Image (spheres, rainbow, N blue to C red):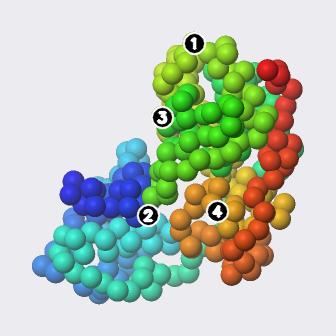
Amino acid sequence: MDRFRERVVGRSIGEDTFTAYRLWIERFEQWFTGDEPSIRDLEDFDSMLEDPARPTYAWENDVGRPAPISYSYSSRNQAISAVKKWIRRRYGVDIPEQPGDIVLGEEESFTPTYLSRERVRDIVESADSACNCDGCAAALAVSYDAVLRASELVQLDVGDLSPETRELAVTATKGSRDSTIKLGENTVERVTAYLREATHSTGPLFRNTYGDPWNKGAWSTHAIRYHVEEGSHAFGRHTPILHQLEAGVSLADVFRRARHQSPVTRASYARYVDVDVPSLAGGALPDERLIDDVTNDRAERL
């Protein structure tokens, strides 16, 4: 498994996805009793996952919750994707069929949860008074502005932001690439104002009330409890992506900023906003005025 991880993490998937893949692979190996897996075995594994009457296995997810009675289409699609990669390396068996050709049923409709621009502005403006942590308003503004996953936000260091150029270096997660994002003026001003009052000038950029760095799970839980009941992913990913598409920014530029690698994900967003998928080329860069307008508050000017 360690060798498999070395081969796939950072190439086709990120660390978080590998954690999920590992669970599916362990479940497959517990279930599979043959010598050499075939497409029939993958079809049977998928059917077993989908069947509420399947044999009981002592399965839990990565935080210890028991397995559901029946897995969704998207979960089973991920399971088959994981197992296909695994059996190619573990057993030397290459199954050319795509997961969508193996998984039973139809893909659930893509209905992302996203917030209005007014709601985003209200959340950012009220964030620092909504909890006991310093810097939550700055963290939320950066999350929205740079279209960050929670895993990307908590990895940021103080040195990743260049206030002079307004550039933020984002470390890749989930199989994407490292990138540099240009932030809006108000976002940078909010972060620099936060750092003027902070007790740290190096190391992790955003920290909890005890001064410790956030991790992905803790930040996600905190965001839901105190700031965004819809969750940090809806706030930092779905919402800015859809706001930019609605504002007329091209699909290519939106996905470049969001660091989306999956063509399936791109097509889902395109269908949701009724944009022709082939129009992925060209277009204007995200309008900083849009970003600044949404993240603008009454932060102190430098």
Looking at the rendered structure, the secondary structure element under dot 1 is loop
Mark toward the viewer: 2 or 4: 4
Amino acid type assigned to the residue bearing label 4 in the image = Phe
Q: Which mark is residue 215?
A: 3
Specify the quadrant that holds the N terminus.
bottom left
Question: Mark 2 = which residue?
Answer: 69
Q: Is residue 274 left or right of residue 52?
A: right
Of residues 301 and 235, which is closer to you in this image? 301
Question: Mark 4 = which residue?
Answer: 255
Q: Residue at position x 53%, y 65% from top?
A: 261
Give the distance between the C-alpha atoms of the residues marked 4 and 3, in whole angstroms.
25 Å
Label 1 or label 4, whichever comes before in sequence order? 1
The quadrant in which residue 271 appears is: bottom right
Q: Are marks 1 and 4 in contact (CB under 8 Å)?
A: no
Label 2 or label 4, whichever comes before in sequence order? 2
Give the distance between the C-alpha atoms of the residues marked 3 and 2, in whole angstroms.
30 Å
Is residue 282 among what the camera can see?
yes
Question: Mark 1 = which residue?
Answer: 199
The quadrant in which residue 88 appears is: bottom left
The quadrant in which residue 253 appears is: bottom right
Of residues 219 and 249, which is closer to you in this image? 249
Of residues 229 and 57, which is closer to you in this image? 229
Amino acid type assigned to the residue bearing label 1 in the image = Thr
Q: Are marks 2 and 4 in contact (CB under 8 Å)?
A: no
Q: Are marks 1 and 3 in contact (CB under 8 Å)?
A: no
Is residue 294 among what the camera can see?
no
Give the distance between the C-alpha atoms of the residues marked 2 and 4, in whole angstroms.
35 Å
Specify the quadrant that holds the C terminus.
top right
